Amino acid sequence: MGDWIINLLTGESVPAGSEWRLSFEGLSPGWAVVLFIALSAGAIAGYVLYAKDVPKHWQRVMMALRIVLIGLVLLLLTKPVVHMTINEPVRQNLLVLVDTSSSMLLGDRRVSLDDQKRAALAAGTIDPAQGLKQSFSGPLPPELAGANRWDVLARVNANEKLRLWERLQEKSNLSFYRFGRDAVTLGVMEPAGGRRQLDKADISSFFQDIRPTDSATGIGEGMRQVLEQNRGQAIAGMLVITDGANNSGLPPGEAARIALEQNIPLFIYGIGVTTPADLIVQELSAPKLAFVKQRVDVKFKLRAQGFTGRQIVATLKSGNKVLAEEKVVILQDGEQEVALHFTPQELGDLTLEASVPALPEEVAKENNKATAKMRVVDNKIHVLFIDQEPRWDYRYLLFYLQHSPKIDVKTYLIDGEPDLDKMPDSVFLQKLPDNRESLFKYELLILGDVDPKSLGENRMKLIREWVEQSSGGIIFLAGTKYNPIAYAGTPLEELLPVVPDATVGKEAYAARSRSQVSLRLTTIGASSPYLQLSEKPEENQTLWASFPGVRWTAAVSRAKPGAQVLMVDPRPERAGRDGALPVFATQSYGSGETVYIGTDETYRWRSKVGVKHYAQVWDLVMQSLSLQRLQGASSRTQLKVDRQRYFVGDKVVISGKVYNDRYEPLTNSSLQGNVKIATRAPDGKVSETQQRLDIMASGDGASPAGGASGTPVSASATTAGEYRGELTVKVPGEYSFSTLQDPGAVLKFEVVEPKLEQMETAMDERLMKSTAAAGRGRFLREEDLYTLPGMITDQSATVATFRKVNLFYSLWWLVAIVFIASLEWLMRRLLALK
């Protein structure tokens, strides 16, 4: 009934399924009712009092006309409007994401019968409706037996028995996106020439210019970006076509949960085989420093698939020179560690390359080698170890130092037995160094739980000068009596990366807990060279989690502003106002580096975890702390990068301190310098380019054409002499950066092309299944594609639109008012009424 009235007053039809409501924008309906009652009563009274001679039936007719007229006028004054909600059907979009990373060009050897059937299903040589249940005599033709993943997708596109895209287009609009590291819109696949249905030519034309060339795969990131672009649209579902080799961006599971929140069905079509034959060399682990004519042990992880029982030869080279070879028997599918060793005969920088031969059956041959940088020096690390008494940490650590071929250690026990220095081949000193000559010959100083009174004011100042001006490295190995609590107010306090807590009493400071607590790596510590037991973050965390806990950590107030906290005591009761209690922290001081270890129970790592990891931890600490001095680093310019190898497109952070020739912090607002890039051509020829790189504090960073773009390295507002900047590297090569004020201080790092796509050659079925499960979607293989269109809803979605219709603008109001008023006037004239 209401739809008919709206249609009459407005001349517009109300669409089926629409909703409407009436409202008023003029006179209040309540007042209109009051006025209607009053005016109607007046009209009735007027006719009763002044039209007594008129017959009763005519009197009632005129009363009714007058009341209707009053009602119409008052209704018009209320300005009635209708708010309509119109639900209109629209055609939904199916979002199709196609993986265009270079791993899609990997050819797969299809050994299993199911994988052979899948290739045949894609090509249409067997019935796609029967899936894997049908028989297949084989063998596959050569063009299918080793077809790469992109070829398989091309055959799916052209499969006239499957007609995948034609049938999907009948249900929804097909909106395509390609993705590597990010998603890129390809457009809508639609019939040409105004036709209603797709044909083979439409599909071929759409895919002809798409090539899998991206260097990374960001499945989750691509999904997130596409979902964001289509937020609020009518979506029938999302179809992701990929081999699952995710190596960039947002985890796919998180993107799947976003799709679930938006109520978008998720379908993931996995292309490839789960067990491709391949050998992958990864994680070549070699020390950053080695000593000439001393054995160097390196190792790498070899991941094998499909070559169980095969014997191969692993090779270690530097340039064209073979350093070591080792026969390796592949025990089983999975990872195994391969160890190699060699003895460097010459000084200098080496680029080590570990490799295994590329076998004909492999799916990828570019991932059979890995490289690492190493510097060969001819001097050992000279270490001075001072402690008050022979506590457990002292004994274990001294044993390690004495037996390390890289270290020449001397030690002094303040409360030790007399005449220790007179023993044969003794490492004990007769007295503490007390002048520059005797102290400055050491690279490292390990300071145990030493009473500062035993050192004396002058010796502590000498230690501070040695760190600041001679690139010395000092390790504060905490103890329950003096270190670090007794160093407050002494010259050593400046060297500490932490602030001692002077409010703690001696007994409370030395008290040990009854239970052990596992120390926790911070985010910075997990990637720090000091604590990096494995290049894989997850494995590094696992290794540190296996270390036994400690029962005592030194109470400190907080870390200093310039310090980096690498490890903490996670107990809430030990936390301070700045967070968890620091246990392992580092800081730069002048040209040197200081390390704080806030427990005296590192010996537990050796007794529980074993000599291997105990020695590995201290090797890392010793090498990292002495690296700058052994590499001949400048004592004035101490810029550094956070790692030695970057991928093209990475952002390189340059940071550190700079001093003038008087070893005073530099206060300039900018640093000027050069960046040199040495690139190697395919024929092995090396070319070098140099670009002026003025890294300004003003924000106008130069962008050298050679492959780096810069942002300011500006003087810090909080600490004089500290500088920080960023470079975005664009070409692979050996990079060297130096400032014009100190050109001898060269900062080196390497930039390589990422080979992420060659490191994961198997189709990651597990990842894709878990992603589909996170979004309550479906994981599909070739045998499922025939039923995919049936999974996509063919119901049209509805989109609500809102309209306001002004009923008081209708011509019918005027017609009704004029008609009723005229009719009443005519009756009054005929009945001789005024």
Image (cartoon, rainbow, N blue to C red):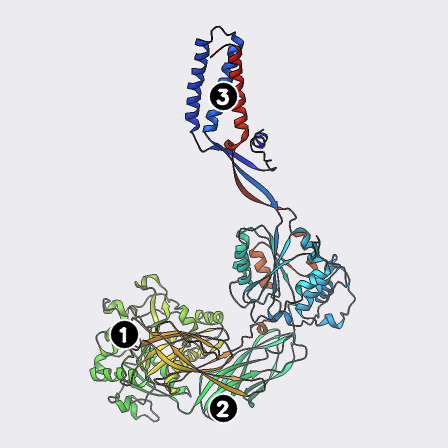
For the question of whether residue 257 can be seen, the reply is no
Q: Which residue is mark 1?
A: 484
Q: Quadrant of the N terminus?
A: top right
x, y percent for residue 695: 38, 77
| Helix, strand or loop for disc 2 | loop
Indicate which disc residue 343 carries: 2
* Proximity of marks 1 and 3: CB atoms separated by less than 8 Å: no
Q: CA distance from mark 2 to mark 1?
A: 41 Å
Secondary structure under badge 1? loop
Q: Disc 3 residue type?
A: Leu
Q: Tell me the SS state at disc 3.
A: helix
How far across and how far down the image is residue 761, in percent? 61, 71
Q: Residue at x 24, y 67 (%)?
A: 504
Residue depicted at x 70% and y 60%: 202
Of discs 1 and 3, which sits in the foreground? 3
Q: Is residue 464 above or below residue 194?
A: below
